[in-house]
Image: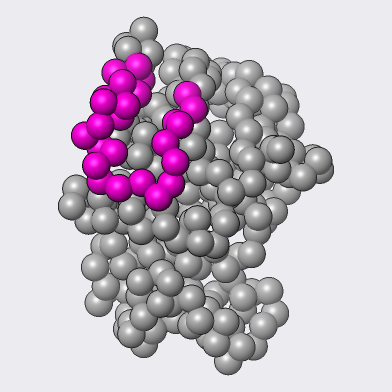
Amino acid sequence: MSIFSANHILKTYQGEPVIQDISVELNRGEVVCLLGESGIGKTTLFNVMSGLEAPDAGKIILNGEDISSKPGRVSYMLQKDLLMPFKTVIDNVAMPLILKGESLKTARETAGELFEDFGISGYERHYPNQLSGGMRQRAALLRTYLNHNEVILLDEPFSSLDSITKMQMHQWFLNIFSKLNISAFFITHDIDEAIFLSDKIYIMAGRPGRIVEVLDIKQERPRSSDFYVSEQFRAYKAKIISRLKG
């Protein structure tokens, strides 16, 4: 059953539609991808889904409630990690708990319990500039998770990483999301990334941006790197490339 959906969303700028009649949905425990070329309106849709921008038409629904234009109801991690350079990693990660009224001591303790799961144990007192790119993304994901919202939106979370680190992060991402039963939408223009991580892919194309294809990835988890070179993976990729060209 869908816990979160965007229904017939229209968003315009200066009278021109950027995205039009877009409907997407997320079931509990799913990882769903929004795939399309740069500039197609993916981030615009996420800004509407997160409540940061109001749709010109359509609704955003969370557990049956209209949350259109209500920021803070879903967690949103932007493309850049936005870790504050003057704060330690533990204080960066604990920030959502502090903003919700927890004491610094309690927030640090709560956040610290998850550092091992997120692969950053031992770096609590370090500063962001002392972390690798992959570790910064893990810290940013943990901070996003600690908002304690049911749904997480991730805007190209791995785009800044080199290819080897990205593959390692993909495997970790699937493992931690399964363990914590997180439900997430993520944006990418990387076809391989979309196939490997997703339960479902929404393909966007056109001007204005629209959903032109919905593809279910029928590969059970856990997924290994062997999936990248499987016939099934190549078939999914060929279908996506064909649809994008069309």
Q: Residue furthest right?
A: 65
Seen as rendered, the residue at the extreme top is 246
| Residue 193 vertical placement versus 120 (above, below) | above
Would residue 64 appear left or right of 121 to someone viewing this image? right
222 is within the stretch colored magenta: yes
Q: Is residue 108 left or right of residue 160?
A: right
Quadrant into which the C terminus falls = top left
Coordinates of residue 111 in the picture (x, y in percent): 52, 79
> Does the rendering let one see residue 41?
no
Residue at (36, 46) in percent of width and height: 223
Q: Is residue 39 depicted above or below 82 in this figure? A: above
Where is residue 60, by image quadrant?
top right
Provide the residue span drawn in magenta: 215-240
Quarter of the figure with the N terminus: top right
Residue 222 vs 113, above or below: the answer is above
Residue at the image position 62 percent from the left and 75 percent from the top: 97
Q: Quadrant of residue 188?
A: top left
Q: Position of residue 153 (x, y in %)?
A: 53, 48
Instruction: Name which residue lies at 43% across and 46% down.
Output: 221
Structure colour scheme:
one colour
- In the rendered image, residue 242, in percent from the top left (x then y), is placed at 32, 12
The residue depicted at 48 percent of the width and 76 percent of the height is 114
Above-or-below relation of 1 to 221: above
Q: Is residue 176 visible?
A: yes
Q: Is residue 225 magenta?
A: yes
